[in-house]
Image: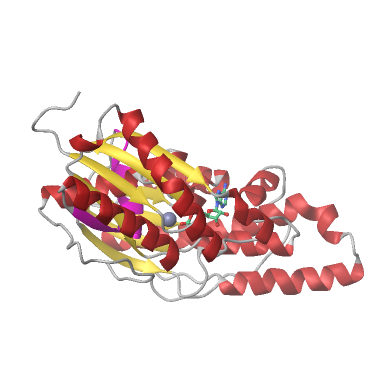
Amino acid sequence: MTGDQDIIILGIESSCDETSASICRNGEVLSNIIATQSIHTAYGGVVPELASRAHMQNIVPVVDDAIRNAGITLQDVDAIAFTQAPGLIGALLVGAGFAKSLAISLHIPVIGVHHMQAHVLSNLIEKPVPEFPFLCLTVSGGHTQIVLCRSPLDLEILGETIDDAAGEAFDKSAKLLGLPYPGGPLIDKYAATGNPEKFQFAEPQIEGLNFSFSGLKTSVLYFLQKEVKQNPDFIQQNLHDLCASVQHTIIKILLKKLKKASLETGIRAICLAGGVSANKGLRSALQEMAIKYHWQVHIPSFEFCTDNAAMIALTGYHYFLNGKFSSLRTSASARATW
Ligand code: KG4
Ligand code: ZN
């Protein structure tokens, strides 16, 4: 049942390889349907053209499921929020085109949402929500950022990667270890029974709150080349220790900057977002930091960490409350500042 005063937002996410739709009523998520495109696994990474085609196939059934699971009808929807940027342009255009067409037919407004802003606000989906202001470490396959969030629409990037993202560091290292894409979850799995101190890899010396991960990949590559030359079975014999050591290095790099950001801003409400926040090593290291530095840590459930439309619908809701709508002439963009 929906009341006259309710604000109902349909959210659509299609920036990479997940087609997702969600319904949010007055800031509460009623449904969150995610269709993951498994076709990319065979190619060792996301193939943009295939992603666009899969979005085209998935978008209608996914939106239909989101509407039905929420127990509403299309006529109840007050606005459609869609991921406008950043992402794969062909993939984004499917979501943008669909959102605008549906909005015209329903005579309702559209709201273009910034994907990275939505990742930060995924922390507001589940109760108890973190107190403002909070710091959010967003770690995904495409991005690594530390964001200061003063209110839902007042966000500031304090630091970000100057080359590879944390997820890429996991995936590229995994590839060097002979693991299939996406390698992040496999590194996590093998690391659980490995020695994180066994091997040492290069840590970047970057000023301020920015990150760099490309040196780590090179360090892993040269180390493996040297060892495999002497012992062709080196990777197989040391897989768990290698995974644990790579993971340990990535976590150290991330948490060093997060600690710096907390000290500089005096903010101890700390949030995580993005696919890499599923990493068990990162989660437990963060909990240890929470005890040591009196942080209040908030980590969304996994379905809201990876790409999802619930975060788009919720961000759209806050735009709606502030009267911020997009023109129907608006399009998508592969890159965009906030
Ligand atoms: O946020 P996400 O689902 O998609 C975007 O990139 O936007 O993040 C995907 C990334 C991949 O690099 C994947 O390897 C990584 O998150 N990932 C993990 C884990 N689960 C997913 N990395 C490390 N440990 C995990 N458990
Ligand atoms: Zn994402």
Q: Which quadrant holds residue 131? A: top left
Q: Please give left or right for residue 260 compared with residue 320 in the image.
A: right
Q: Which quadrant holds residue 331? A: bottom left
Is residue 289 at least partly visible in the picture? Answer: no
In-front residue for pair 336/102: 102
| Span colored in magenta | 110-127
Residue at 26%, 49% (x, y): give it.
102
Is residue 121 rendered magenta in the image? yes
Residue at 43%, 50% (x, y): give it.
307
Residue at 46%, 69% (x, y): give it.
211
Q: Please give left or right for residue 338 compared with residue 145 in the image.
A: left
Q: Position of residue 301 (x, y in %)?
A: 43, 38
Is residue 218 rendered magenta in the image? no
| Quadrant of the rendering where the N terminus is positioned | top left
| Depicted 11 relative to depicted 68: above or below | below
In-front residue for pair 156/3: 3
- Quadrant of ligand 2 in image: bottom left
Is residue 141 at least partly visible in the picture? Answer: yes
| Quadrant of the rendering where the C terminus is positioned | bottom left
Q: Position of residue 50 (x, y in %)?
A: 55, 60
| Depicted 143 relative to depicted 131: above or below | below
| Depicted 8 relative to depicted 132: above or below | above
Q: Position of residue 203 (x, y in %)?
A: 58, 69
Q: Please give left or right for residue 95 compared with residue 274 in the image.
A: left
Q: Position of residue 305 (x, y in %)?
A: 43, 46
Residue at the far front: name it: 105
